[in-house]
Image (cartoon, rainbow, N blue to C red):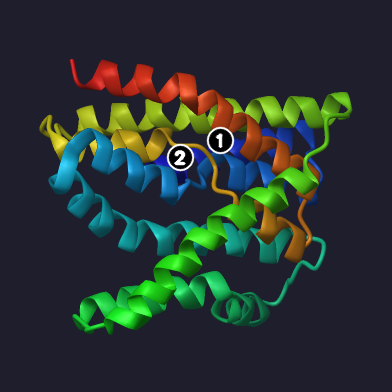
């Protein structure tokens, strides 16, 4: 729900300031997409095995929803935008991120037993993918930006690191969610920076890749300050 409210706000922001479509896709991803590597690592470090188990359950659904929203945005507003609803649906179904997320969710639902050798291979592949995505982001990062790009970078960074956690906290309090691991994990999810694979999606689907790389970089750096503050406040 918090992500949907942020999406509504950035759509209003787009209309008021007439943000170009390809740049809007990067603002969209930067404002709601989350880094699952950082989320799962911090969940275990802060809340132990219980936090890790709950984070895995949480991610199984949020990965699908997050990719559904971001890929739909890219299909509609990217440079290769699709206007036909059927084309948008086909593009969504064919996207590798959606295929991977839905396959993982299906295997989890049927309690499929994955052989040890395959699990080891996938573990190594996952570790390599994180490094590769970081290299891709670094290669696409640009330090020279015009005033429009800088304003979009600032807005997206604030939306991800401050606005999304704030709205999440307000909703949790409004729904009278009890304090505890689940509450803290919801706040952690909202506070983690944008994922590196957002840059790859921007490059492949016609988004503003340099702006996306900058958003990923600055949300990651900013999260080093914002996450400890947010978690310490909600745990008081």
Q: Position of residue 43 (x, y in %)?
A: 28, 41
Q: Position of residue 119 (x, y in %)?
A: 34, 75
Q: Residue at x 45, y 40 (%)?
A: 5
Q: Position of residue 91 (x, y in %)?
A: 64, 77
**Badge 1 vs badge 2, beta-carbon distance below 8 Å:** yes
Quarter where residue 211 is shown: top right
- Residue holding disc 2: 5
Quadrant the C terminus occupies:
top left
**Dot 2: element:** helix
Disc 2: CA contacts within 10 A as few (<14), some (14-19) or many (>=20): some
Q: Position of residue 202 (x, y in %)?
A: 71, 56
- Residue holding disc 1: 9
Q: Residue at x 36, y 21 (%)?
A: 228
Q: Nearer the viewer, residue 2 or 137?
A: 137
Q: Residue at x 58, y 53 (%)?
A: 131
Disc 1 from disc 2: Cα separation: 6 Å
Q: Residue at x 70, y 77 (%)?
A: 84
Quarter where residue 28 is shown: top right
Q: Is residue 1 visible?
A: no
């Amino acid at each position: 729900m918090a992500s949907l409210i942020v999406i509504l706000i950035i759509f209003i922001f787009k209309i008021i300031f007439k943000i170009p479509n390809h740049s809007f896709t990067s603002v969209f991803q930067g404002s709601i997409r989350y880094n699952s590597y950082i989320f799962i690592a911090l969940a275990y470090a802060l809340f132990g095995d219980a936090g890790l188990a709950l984070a895995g359950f949480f991610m199984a659904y949020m990965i699908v929803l997050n990719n559904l929203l971001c890929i739909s945005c890219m299909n509609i507003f990217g440079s290769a935008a699709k206007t036909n609803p059927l084309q948008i649906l086909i593009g969504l179904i064919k996207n590798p991120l959606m295929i991977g997320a839905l396959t993982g969710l299906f295997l989890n639902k049927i309690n499929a037993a994955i052989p040890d050798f395959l699990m080891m291979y996938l573990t190594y592949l996952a570790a390599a993918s994180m490094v590769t995505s970081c290299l891709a982001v670094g290669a696409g990062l640009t330090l020279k930006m015009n005033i429009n790009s800088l304003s979009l970078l600032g807005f997206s960074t604030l939306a991800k690191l401050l606005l999304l956690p704030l709205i999440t906290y307000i909703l949790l309090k409004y729904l009278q969610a009890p304090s505890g691991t689940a509450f803290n994990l919801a706040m952690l999810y909202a506070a983690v920076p944008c994922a590196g694979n957002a840059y790859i999606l921007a490059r492949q689907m016609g988004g503003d890749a340099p702006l996306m790389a900058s958003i990923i970089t600055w949300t990651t750096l900013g999260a080093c300050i914002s996450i400890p503050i947010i978690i310490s406040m909600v745990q008081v």
